[in-house]
Image: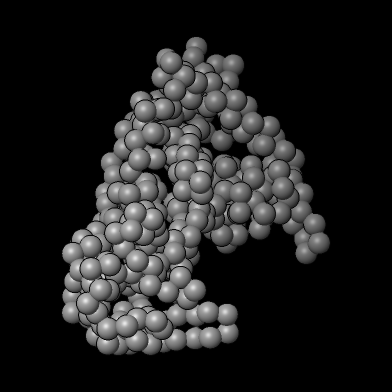
Amino acid sequence: MRAWSRRGDSVIIHTNGQSSVPSMNQSFDLTPTRLRELRAFAAAARRLNFSRAALEVGCTPSVLSRRIAMLEGAVGARLFLRTTRRMALTARGEQLLAQWQRMETVMTELAADLRPADGGLSGRLCVHLPGSFGRHRVAPLLADFMREHPGIRVEATYEDTYVDMVTGRVDLALRLGRLADVQLVARRVGTMRVFPCASPDYLASAPPLRDPAELKAHRCITFSGYRRGTLWSFSRQRQRRAVRIEPVLTCNDAEAIRDALLAGVGVGLQGDYMADTLVAEGRLVDLFPDWNLPSFPIHLLWLPGAERTPALRALIDHLAQGLAA
């Protein structure tokens, strides 16, 4: 008899031809909910600490406690002895831990059976990326990744709008700037510098521009997604300049702003991922190289526990390495 069978959406694990948890139901249905409860129990049994176990499985201690309580209800017995100072497994808990470890072995074998014959990674990943930065910095890395893992299918969206990763069914997102989603796992992979620049043609006929305060006399271009809006705050050592500019053009696309700058429309902010090359080529001028604007941290985000998927974990590592280079 094979080590596993399927009933509807459930998988039933058998060891030696019997259900691996004989004291429960004759067949212990491993629904997604029951598997979460068992993983919570196993983590707590290994660490004998609910807070540390919660970190391991990617939930809060209260959620982990509820999952274990639900499992105890299904088993019909207490699995832990807890006091204010120590925590230990009951005899039934020790038995269940041993049974779960046998289940893990069987599920590992099942995963190996389902793995593609060539041993490569497979699956589908949904990725959400900021428009311009995603196209310039991430798209080439994504292409390299897919050449290396042809069994993976990727759905990539490039847009400068917020997406709810749960309702949008997004596996991985890249965000620039301050994070708002505290429920997501974040990995910082770099920093984007922004600075004001203009074309040599514009500067040849424009008023002098030696200090950020003089921007008020210039034609400025702003990005509508810039959190600080028309207030550009510069710093240099202990000096500060907060300049409220009057834009002649407001745009929601960084590449359109770049094109306007190259055409000599005025002065605008650009990210280093695009502007560094244009400055090196002499097509744009970094106006105040001694002054700094607030930079943007770059983060990869995913749902807690999702990184256990081999394909997603491989993509996270690939992008982190590429963006840090």
| Residue 5 place in picture, x, y as percent | 43, 22
Q: Residue furthest right?
A: 85
Q: Residue furthest top?
A: 1
Indicate left or right for 49 with 7 as reference.
right
Residue found at x 28% / y 67%: 200
Left or right relative to 178: residue 208: left
Name the one closer to the observer, 255 or 263: 263
- The residue nearer to you, when weighing 119 against 156, is 156
Residue 51 falls in which quadrant of the image?
Answer: bottom right
What residue appears at the point 34 percent right and 54 percent down from the top-left corner? 281
The spot of residue 258 in percent (x, y) is 25, 62
Q: Would residue 307 appear left or right of 100 to someone viewing this image?
A: left
**Which residue does the image show at 67% across and 37% down from the upper left?**
97
For the question of whether residue 130 can be seen, the reply is no
Measured as percent of width and height from the top left, residue 253 is found at 23, 63
Residue that protrudes farthest toward the front in the picture: 204
Rendering quarter of residue 133: bottom left
Q: In the figure, 145 relative to 305: above or below?
A: above
Q: Tell me what residue is drawn at x 34 percent, y 86 percent.
A: 214
Q: Nearer the viewer, residue 63 or 147?
A: 147
Q: Position of residue 292 (x, y in %)?
A: 47, 74
Number of marks in the rendered image: 0
Residue 242 is at least partly visible in this image: yes
Which residue is at the front of the view, 214 or 227? 214
Q: Which colour assignment does the render follow?
A: one colour
Taking 85 as reference, is 10 above or below it? Answer: above
